């Protein structure tokens, strides 16, 4: 099995159209996960994010600030 670093290097060497097609296929594959697998994957991600918050590698953003930024971007 190929390792992630090798796959990424190969992917970044692709033409932009092929990278876009690859990205679309990868995202679609995530939508095809079984409910149990999706829950497991999101659980791992939630743990990773919580660890980053606790370590100070991430910060929270108030919902009000997010909504203001959204409004600015959608104008």
Image (spheres, grey):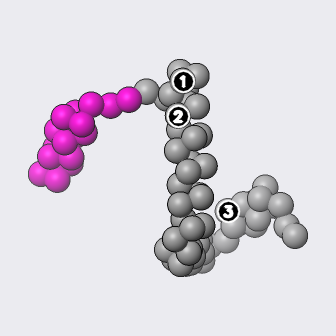
- Left or right, residue 14 beside residue 9: left
Kindly report the distance in space between the C-alpha atoms of the residues bearing marks 3 and 1: 33 Å
Q: Which residue is mark 2?
A: 50
Q: Which residue is mark 1?
A: 54
- Residue located 67% across and 71% down the image: 14
- Residue located 54% across and 24% down the image: 54
Q: Is residue 31 magenta?
A: no
Give the residues in magenta.
60-75
Q: Earlier in the sequence, mark 3 or mark 2?
A: 3
Mark number displayed over residue 41: none
Q: Position of residue 10 (x, y in %)?
A: 75, 66
For the N terminus, give its image quadrant: bottom right
Q: Position of residue 66 (x, y in %)?
A: 25, 39
Secondary element type, mark 3: helix
Secondary element type, mark 2: helix
Q: Which residue is mark 3?
A: 12
Please state which of residues 57 and 13 is positioned toward the viewer in this rendering. 57
- Residue lying at the far right of the rendered structure: 1
| Majority secondary structure of magenta residues | helix
Mark 1 closeness class: few <14, some 14–19, many ≥20 residues within 10 Å = few
Q: Verify CB contact (< 8 Å) between mark 2 and mark 1.
A: yes
Q: Position of residue 41 (x, y in %)?
A: 59, 58
Q: Position of residue 24 (x, y in %)?
A: 51, 75
Q: Is residue 74 above or below residue 30?
A: above
Q: Is residue 64 magenta?
A: yes
Q: Of discs 3 and 2, which sits in the foreground?
A: 2
Mark 3 closeness class: few <14, some 14–19, many ≥20 residues within 10 Å = few
């Amino acid at each position: 099995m190929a390792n992630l670093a090798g796959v990424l290097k190969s992917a970044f060497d692709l033409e932009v159209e092929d990278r876009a097609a690859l990205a679309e296929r990868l995202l679609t594959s995530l939508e095809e996960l079984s409910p149990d697998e999706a829950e497991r994957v999101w659980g791992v991600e939630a743990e990773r994010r919580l660890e980053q918050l606790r370590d100070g590698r991430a910060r929270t953003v108030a919902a009000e600030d997010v909504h203001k930024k959204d409004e600015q971007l959608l104008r």
